[in-house]
Amino acid sequence: SEGELVPFSRLERFSDGEDSRASLRVRIRELKVSLGRAVSREFGATELIINVRNRGYRLVPPTD
């Protein structure tokens, strides 16, 4: 849901490899690139899906 903080512990269940947080970072970046291509746009680090340091990720609405 928009604005909801999803903790790393909840997301790590779906990641691969020994370093699950690194795997998550890669997957999040891939999602942002794919979604950006779909809308002809490039999302930066502080757009769409943001990392809340040491806590998890948050979905934020894209800006125009």
Image: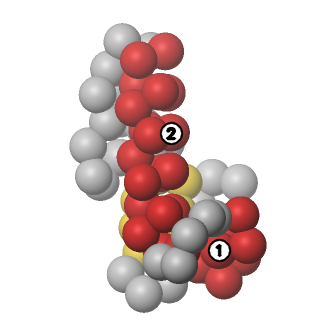
Q: Is residue 23 above or below residue 45?
A: below
| Residue appearing at x 50%, y 51% in the figure | 27
Q: Residues within 10 Å of mark 2 (few under 14, many from 20)?
A: some
Q: Locate residue 39, reporting x and y percent.
A: 44, 15
Q: Residue under circle 2? A: 31
Q: Locate residue 56, reporting x and y percent.
A: 52, 75
| Residue appearing at x 26%, y 43% in the figure | 44
Q: Locate residue 23, reporting x and y percent.
A: 48, 63
Q: Secondary structure at mark 2?
A: helix
Q: Is residue 26 above or below residue 23?
A: above
Q: Residue under circle 1? A: 12
Quadrant where the image shows the C terminus: top left
Amino acid type at image mark 2: Leu
Q: Locate residue 54, reporting x and y percent.
A: 42, 87
Answer left or right for 25 relative to 45: right
| Residue appearing at x 42%, y 75% in the figure | 52
Amino acid type at image mark 1: Glu
Q: Who is closer to the viewer here, 22 or 62?
A: 22
The answer to whether residue 9 is visible is: yes
The answer to whether residue 60 is visible is: no
